[in-house]
């Protein structure tokens, strides 16, 4: 049975070039069980590959390899070569995280073969501290990043002794409630679509008229930076975890959300990164912040349900707390706009704001014309309880997203248990030495904490 690609889904295929593979990924770090036999890694590999049928969306293959084929559709592949999709590798001793990230940087830069379902999984052993990793990548046209994370995490065990099939096994289709049992949302009529188009166009025109200095942002309100050039194929992926309680303490003090604090860390880090190259622009950078519009009970069997808002990062503001306040104002404005829209207006807004990006990539003009935004910053919620893969405890889950021509850095954050796991992906040439961002993210958080403590001290001595 064929499933036609939605406009946004096919857009990810159309934008793909040798320099800009359009897949998202995740690097999951695990602890080998203390009582595991010597054959544990081989047993885990066999377990991952031993599936009789593959579940949606992992069994979907393109009916055509041509990105611009208007008849392109997903077809279900019932003869999947698991040796192709499941890869096994090991790090050389001593197996440092540095070498792991270097390996993932190379793997994430490689496009996937459209003759196969567009996903791959790499089991990586030999990591110091008796650990191993699973790096999974999946094409954005097949499923968006939020849904991909939800699928992989929901299909992990809640206890070490829980016996479950691999995440891509079709056995999950009998274990989970299927979308066919849920009432489907009725598509909009012509009149409703025309009305939504008009409302969205009016709102975008109003946003376009706001001064560039305003914290209220829309597309084309971003300054030019060194991050907004053409990209090359090579990638650099860096990752680090921060304590969730630490960020929540800062959020409570400033009456901010956790996402506001994440954005403030990114704004402070990018300010220092660009100052280091003497290229901090006159106006503050603008982040494109993806927002999931997939309902909590929607099936994660394919497609994209993502919109996005544009938010200032306050990079021209020296004070960390003042930068956070600017981000709060900008984010609240964006939330209010999205919250006032109907579902059809959100869908229309998403298409209209993504069309310039699609057109720029297809025409090869992105990186040579004014940018829509400067950087993508995404925050994906994850489980608060421990998860297990074939008895091995998940320690961290670092997201690895995608970049385009004109947009050379992407920062994605995934929460897990008591941590926020940051993954930064960048073009090695357009955004060199991106590992510095990890130090700058820590410094930005320290600045917020320092100003918080100074304010408390003044209050106590008053």
Image: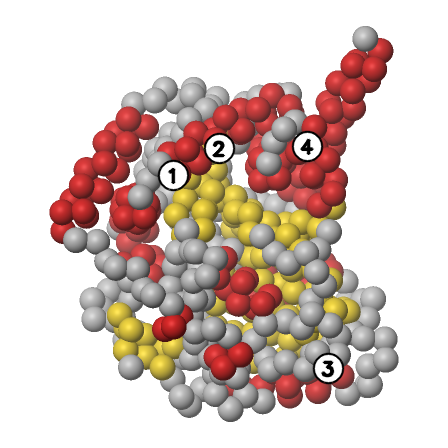
Mark 1 and mark 2: Cα distance apart in space: 11 Å
Mark 1 and mark 3: Cα distance apart in space: 46 Å
Name the N-terminal-most of marks 1 and 4: 4
Name the N-terminal-most of marks 2 and 3: 3
Image quadrant assignment for residue 392: bottom right
Name the N-terminal-most of marks 4 and 3: 3
Instruction: Name the foreground residue: 357 vs 34.
Output: 34
Nearer the camera: disc 4 or disc 3: 4
* Quadrant placement of the N terminus: bottom left
Q: Are marks 1 and 3 in contact (CB under 8 Å)?
A: no
The 10 Å Cα crowd at callout 3, few under 14, some 14 to 19, many 20 or more, is some
Nearer the camera: disc 1 or disc 3: 1
The residue carrying mark 4 is 252
Image quadrant assignment for residue 178: bottom left
- Residue 157 lies, in percent from the top left, at 67, 73
Disc number placed over residue 26 in the picture, else none:
none
Q: Are marks 4 and 2 in contact (CB under 8 Å)?
A: no
The residue carrying mark 2 is 331
Name the N-terminal-most of marks 4 and 2: 4
- Residue 230 lies, in percent from the top left, at 41, 47
């Amino acid at each position: 049975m064929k499933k036609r690609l939605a406009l946004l889904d096919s857009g990810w295929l159309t934008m793909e070039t040798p320099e800009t593979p359009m897949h998202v990924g995740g690097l999951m770090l695990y602890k080998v069980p203390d009582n595991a036999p010597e054959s544990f890694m081989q047993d885990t590999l066999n377990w991952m590959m031993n599936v009789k049928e593959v579940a949606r969306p992992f069994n979907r293959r393109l009916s055509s390899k041509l990105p611009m084929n208007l008849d392109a559709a997903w077809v279900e592949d019932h003869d999947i070569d698991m040796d192709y999709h499941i890869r096994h590798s090991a790090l050389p001793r001593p197996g440092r995280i540095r070498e792991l990230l270097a390996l993932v940087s190379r793997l994430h830069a490689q496009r996937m073969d459209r003759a196969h379902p567009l996903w791959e999984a790499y089991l990586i052993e030999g990591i110091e501290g008796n650990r191993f990793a699973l790096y999974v990548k999946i094409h954005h046209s097949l499923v968006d990043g939020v849904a991909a994370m939800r699928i992989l995490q929901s299909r992990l065990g809640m206890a070490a002794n829980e016996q479950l099939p691999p995440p891509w096994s079709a056995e999950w289709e009998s274990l989970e409630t299927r979308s066919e049992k849920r009432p489907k949302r009725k598509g909009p009529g012509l009149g409703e679509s025309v009305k939504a188009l008009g409302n969205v166009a009016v709102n975008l025109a109003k946003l376009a008229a706001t001064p560039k200095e305003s914290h209220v942002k829309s597309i084309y309100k971003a300054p030019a930076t060194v991050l907004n050039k053409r990209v090359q194929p090579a990638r650099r992926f860096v990752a680090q975890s921060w304590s969730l309680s630490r960020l929540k303490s800062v959020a409570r003090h400033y009456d901010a959300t956790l996402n506001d604090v994440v954005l403030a860390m990114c704004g402070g880090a990018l300010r220092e990164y660009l100052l280091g190259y003497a290229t901090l622009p006159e106006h503050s950078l603008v982040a494109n912040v993806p927002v999931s519009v997939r309902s909590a009970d929607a099936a994660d069997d394919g497609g994209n349900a993502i919109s996005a808002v544009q938010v200032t990062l306050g990079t021209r503001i020296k004070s960390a707390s003042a930068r956070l306040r600017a981000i709060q104002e900008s984010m609240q404005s964006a939330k209010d706009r999205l919250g006032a829209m109907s579902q059809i207006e959100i869908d229309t807004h998403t298409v209209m704001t993504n069309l310039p990006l699609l057109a720029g990539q297809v025409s090869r003009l992105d990186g040579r014309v004014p940018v829509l935004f400067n950087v993508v910053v995404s925050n994906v919620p994850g489980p608060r309880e421990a998860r297990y893969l074939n008895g091995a405890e998940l320690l961290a889950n670092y997201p690895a997203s995608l970049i385009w021509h004109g947009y050379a850095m992407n920062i994605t954050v995934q929460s897990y248990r008591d941590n926020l796991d940051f993954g930064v992906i960048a073009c090695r040439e357009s955004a060199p030495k991106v590992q510095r961002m990890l130090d700058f993210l820590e410094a930005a958080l320290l600045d917020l904490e320092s100003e918080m403590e100074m304010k408390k001290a003044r209050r106590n001595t008053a």
